Image (tube, grey):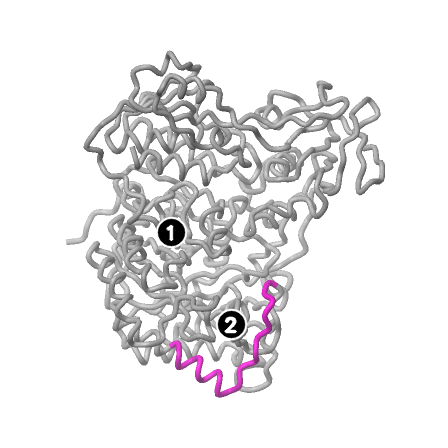
Amino acid sequence: MTAAPHPRFPHLFAPLDLGFVTLRNRVLMGSMHTGLEDHARDFPKLAAYFAERAEGGVGLMVTGGFAPNVRGWLKPLSGTLSMPWQVRRHRQVTSAVHANGGRICLQILHAGRYGYHPLQVAPSAIKAPINPFSPKALSASGVERQIRAFARSAKLAREAGYDGVEVMGSEGYLLNQFTASRTNKRSDAWGGDATKRMRFAVEIVRRIREACGPDFIVIYRLSMLDLVDGGLAWDEVVQQAQAVEAAGATIINTGIGWHEARVPTIATSVPRAAFVDVTARLKPHVSVPLVATNRINMPDVAERVLASGAADMVSMARPLLADPRWVAKARDGRVDEINTCIACNQACLDHVFENKRASCLVNPRACHETELVYAPTSAPKRVAVVGAGVAGLACATVAAQRGHTVTLFEATDDIGGQFNLARRIPGKEEFNETIRYYRRRIELDGVDLRVSSRVDDATLTGFDRVVLATGVVPRPVEFPGHDDPRVLRYDDVLAGRVAVGPRVAIVGAGGIGCDVAEFLAHEGVSPSLDIDAWRREWGVDVDYTDVPGGLRAPEKPPVARAIWLLQRSAGKPGARLAKTTGWIHRASLKTRGVQALGGVQYVRFDDAGFHITVDGEPRTLEVDNVVICAGQLSNNPLEAPLRAAGRDVQVIGGADVAAELDAKRAIAQGSRVAAAL
């Protein structure tokens, strides 16, 4: 008997029949490297990570990338499936997933010239601009060895219990390097015209199907929009899709952009579902299911994509880091309880690039499921949490979830703390979702929230434990004229408490300074809320009307103000921003005409403007305002009197360490303190 369609998300929760297996819904958990793939000792943790998401209802999951041989390593000793003795560790993962009703595919990823090691190979000896190592060009026999390695890895995956494999053919990795003329300069049977360039990928799919049989899922991750010069033309994308389908692919997943592309593809400033149109363009040309991907993070977005006919499945990786029960919550009508991915990259991709284990800013349990456990308490306590920024919110809700009686005091009239400033930055609108999530958690977990409540040590009597999450205050900078009313604090600017003139100098080029520059430089609707405006600004051509690769000349956006971004230390302002997103902020500010200066000394501010020296040379910036973004100081007036009174006190978040708006550390610290109560 066929089940009735889901009342709210009928397309998202429709089963997908692949012929030999039926997926329970249209959600694909996309591949994402966690750092747990690289060592056998971490496979129990990897199994727990996937099991929690399988139990949460995901239709099909894909692992992080595993190399088919050492030449394909992402880095030395990274995750590999090439030998029979490696099968046993993988069975821990597949058994855990199947025990929780899920299905899982292993991603086979050959890094090619993106491999961070001297053994890398590529179709041609062309060094990647993001890698210090130069690849060796594969010989014809070397090409054949790589094909065999893919087929062998897929066969071992089947033996390990995987339901299928995903062949990574996008994002600029080896198969993509073969298909694009940018990196394939060969003149033999594996290079030249599009048919020869794609032959490597097609042969890999054919050999995998031959090795693994007809009842095995083969996903091909196809680069549908390279976003680099020398990328595929649209007719070549279509030709490759049809060829891999004919070779035996079960599903074609969308790949967007190379890692060396000048266009952001998954950061928070990228509009939701910004690349779905390119998947929709391919839909009439193939018969196998297509997967749309990138910046699909909420059920209404996913349902809209599927209902439009643009794709047959939606891929989400980071949203399922943020909330392993995303699918179950959507299915059960509890969308307001979803802990939404804000696409910040701070604990996931940034960690991976730093050789750390991945996690999630809004969910520190991600990839730490066996270590950070929110078990019901056997000894309930009365807990006071002072401050409803994200550190306090995390601590209060986790503690209440565990069974403690929690009172959350907030001096202002609403929750959110510094997040209320961050979410006002153009491109950071997703931060609103985190405040919505915590607002709902307060209701569900029974936290007694008391806003507009300033407390002292007397107020906090009667509690067994006090957690101080009182946050930060802006760090002042003193120079002659710093007390002029035209010299403004960043929090007053972002909160809209002060007016800002058309010419502005910003003191401090860290995360706060760059955010304030973004805030002041934008005019009109944020591009992250307007897909067409965002595409024009970054030069994205999903219609392939200009050149191969899906690029066109970027258009300069409107400029709201003349802005100078100043940094006391020498060097490039903004250089210390996060690795995976800092370049996006710098590029956006440059496009908007923000002038960034390093090696600045602040002399004075007067009616003539802001007098500074730059590398010792005097300059006067004729500005209407100076905005101080020079960091923060901990705001922690309660700790000393409480400790003097012998109270049990813990300090978390900015009140503990006043690092720049470090929500990742704040939420993790608040959660861990609550887990230990």
**Any magenta on residue 146?**
yes
* Residue under label 1: 306
Judged from this view, the residue extending furthest toward the left is 1
Q: Sequence order check: which comes first, mark 2 or mark 1?
A: 2
* Residue at x-position 28% and y-position 49%: 370
Above or below residue 481? Residue 68 is below
Quadrant position of residue 242 = bottom left
* Residue at x-position 71% and y-position 28%: 626
**SS at mark 1?**
helix
Residue 444 point in image, percent of width and height: 28, 29
Mark 1 nearby-residue class (10 Å; few <14, some 14–19, many ≥20): many
- Give the number of the disc on residue 112: 2
Which tag is nearer the camera, tag 2 or tag 1? Answer: 2
- The type of residue carrying mark 1 is Leu
**Any magenta on residue 518?**
no
Q: Nearer the viewer, residue 558 or 307?
A: 558
* Residue at x-position 65% and y-position 33%: 520
Q: Quadrant of the N terminus?
A: bottom left
Residue 413 seen:
no
Span highlighted in magenta in the image: 130-150
